[in-house]
Image (cartoon, rainbow, N blue to C red):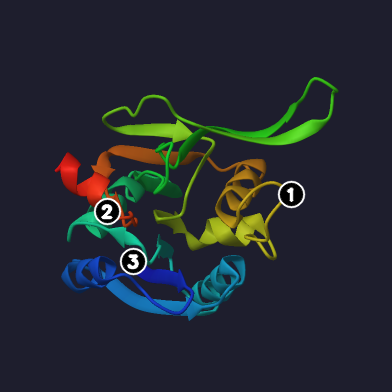
Amino acid sequence: MRTLIAIPCMDMVHTLFFASMIALEKPGETEVAVSSSSLVFEARHLLARKAIEGGFDRILWLDSDMHFGPDLMEKLAADMDTGLEYVSAVYFTRKNPVKPCVYEIVHDTPNAEGEMIPTAESVTEIPDGLFEVEGTGFGAVMMTVDLVRRVGRLPFYPLEGYGEDLSFCRRARAAGAKLYCDGRIRIDHVGQSLVNETFWKRT
């Protein structure tokens, strides 16, 4: 089983991500690829093309602001080995209100005027195991390369009102894919906070 670890980024990666990558256990035949672009969907397209043209079986998407344990890849691969074609770890938004980057609703819904508007609602509970979802962020997602092929040309190009990750999820479900999240795999989203006197007095 050949896996491409695909890392889209702008121009820098977080120290905690770098430390996680050094410690990451890489079972099977694994290659790491980084693509830098100010447009993340373009970076993802380049990495997806490399996976397809390079004859890889799976892609592990990792965002450069994630912090995870050394067994992350092994756990996601174990889920995939049960016959899945898409599985995500659990992580949360970096800004308030903090919510899971795991979505039970990713589709257009009508507003009061009957106009269809983009809608994405996070799950309210996270089961302790595999559960089907309508979409996830791409902080830590493993998928088959075959799924990328089925979604078609420019799979990450953003649909109106969605980021490149949820746009892919909508296309994947339209192509008949079932998307899963593993509630047992929790990772950290590296964020930023302003440290001031108020922060000091809370500690």
**Residue 170 position in % (x across, y down):** 63, 44
Q: Position of residue 165 (x, y in %)?
A: 55, 53
Q: Which mark is residue 160?
A: 1
Q: Amino acid at mark 1?
A: Glu
The foreground one among 49 and 101 is: 101
Q: Nearer the viewer, residue 56 or 69?
A: 69
* Nearer-N-terminus badge (1/3): 3
Give me the disc on residue 171.
none
Q: Nearer the viewer, residue 158 or 129?
A: 158
As shown in the figure, which amino acid type bears the numbered disc 3? Met
Which residue was labeled with disc 2? Answer: 196
Give the alpha-carbon distance from disc 2 to disc 3, as whole Å.
49 Å
Q: Nearer the viewer, mark 2 or mark 3?
A: 2
Point 60% across, 56% down: residue: 164
Q: Which mark is residue 1?
A: 3
- In the image, residue 66 sits, relative to residue 31, either above or below, namely above
At 84% from the left and 23% from the top, the residue drawn is 114
